[in-house]
Image: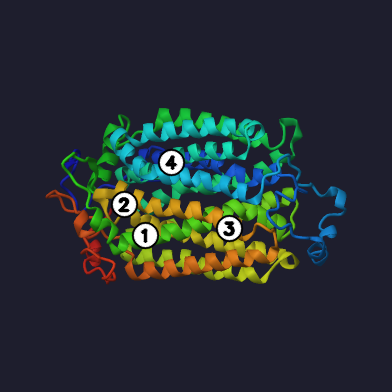
Amino acid sequence: MELEKANLTTNRESPKISVLWSPYSRRLRIAILLALALGIEGLMRSNINMAMICMIKNDSSKSQGIVKYNFSEYDGKCMYDNINSSRNSFKQYEGEFEWSGQQQSIIFTSFYLGGLFSVIPGAYLCTKFGSKYVVFWGAILNVAGTFLTPLTARHLGPYAVVFIRFLMGTGQGILVPCMNVLIADWFPMFEKSMAVAIATTGNQISVITALFFTAELCQFKLLGGWPAAFYVYAIIGTIFCTIWFCYVIDRPELDKKITQMEIDFISDNKKRIINVSQNNTIPWMKIVTSGPVLAASLNSFAQNFFNVGLVTYIPLYYKTVLRANLTSNGIMSALPFIVQLVTKITFATTADYLKKNMLMSNTTVTKMFNFIGSVGASLIIFLVTYFDCENRVIAVILIMMSVGISSGYIPGYNTSIVCIAPKYTAVVGSYCRIWAQFASVMAPFTIGLLVKSNNPKDWNYVFYILTTLLFSCGIHFQIYGSSSPMKWAKFETQDEEIDEPLQNETTLNEPNTIDKGDNELKNLKIN
């Protein structure tokens, strides 16, 4: 194992601060570029969620699944005719394809299945060739797939679209492991929550943009309707590829414009692994049996099942249960993720403040916010089952609240991933990402099966599953979760790890107890 030791100062008790929120901060630029990557690639991932209800014929019995639900009685209950001033003002969901509900769910699932196959190779590629080039070529694959989707759908059918989406998924599956590597290389411990929060704001921005603007593009016949959603986002993706290739730098010491103060600040407040020798073996058994790793993995599964399930099917929920028109659908679908964008920054800022000022240990902060994001969101999403189109405002508010506070996962288990095994950040990140990808594959397929008849009551089962999953995994994290480095992931160096003391290994049979050394954080003084 070769360790980068350049530019280390000897004054560890009073290191100079390089302010993150500065126009000259190079690590802030990395976080913003990661947000751009997640945002632009997210556009190419999420646009089909809204586009699908524009692509499918509204009156097709095949597109409704095996059983077509009769909405006449339900519409009377909801006073559907009175939603707008007249029925003529309602913008119909008109499409051209007669794809079954099962075919649609397979299309949704195929993207995440592709990501599942590229997670582990992605971690290796990021380490071997650098995140800059790996993310770049993955983005190129997504741009090409987005351009080809309309033509493929019209001339080759749904299963050809499945293949295209699978390839796009492989291109995006490498993004998160590369993000973890960049954050581990560029940010000290007490900035990691903020770094993850800044980077992952791209997820919310992409969903907000994709759901809202795709709904409008579907109605904009001058650009061809729904195909415009793919062509416009592919053009944006092309611009992003150029920006990423020109401005991303893999490690601080490779940046020719970084200030000496910033590189000293980064070096003094963290350890970075530069190269892994061929003789070094990854402790897979310790990783897969580690309590904190499993806790992070389970919560990664729960969060992604929750997020992917809602992002994929929330437009259909608003259409079939709340009976919203296309424009209203786009607005209401975007609102929860606008709230999530705000709460994410708020939670991350609060978490970093608590850690930087030694008000709580890293692990305590991580567990507290993960509890909010998991158990809190589960209780709110359960309440949605009591409301339908007669109380659509309450239903929308509850969904907004549940998605909003789920951003507690960012300073929660997401921060834990980049802290518990600094020596194996890419490996642990990829391992947790496998769980996330399994959830991303299962969510659209499972929900698609539950709501294939479009019966509004079927959605209650969806919310029951989400509630159970979020709650149980959240409680598990309170028992086993941590953000302290594991003993088996310690650095092979004489230099002192100042972020937080090493934690003894916690296995599946040994719940994580109070970290005895957490109070040692108070020995670090930041002036």
Residue 385 location, x and y as percent?
63, 69
The residue labelled by disc 3 is 447
Badge 4 amino acid: Leu
The residue labelled by disc 4 is 34
Instruction: Give the secondary structure at mark 3.
Output: helix
Badge 3 amino acid: Ile
Q: Residue at x 22, y 63 (%)?
A: 505
Q: CA distance from mark 3 to mark 2?
A: 29 Å
Tell me if residue 298 can be seen. Answer: yes
Camera-nearest residue between 49 and 367: 49
Q: Earlier in the sequence, mark 2 or mark 4?
A: 4
Q: CA distance from mark 3 to mark 1?
A: 24 Å
Q: CA distance from mark 3 to mark 4?
A: 30 Å
Q: Which label sits on residue 296?
A: 1
Residue 514 location, x and y as percent?
27, 71
Is residue 508 positioned above or below 327 on the image?
Answer: below
Instruction: Give the secondary structure at mark 1.
Output: helix
Tag 2: Cα neighbours inside 10 Å, few (<14), some, or many (≥20)? many
Badge 1 amino acid: Ala
Tell whether label 4 touches label 1 (CB within 8 Å).
no
Q: Earlier in the sequence, mark 2 or mark 1?
A: 1
Q: CA distance from mark 2 to mark 4?
A: 19 Å
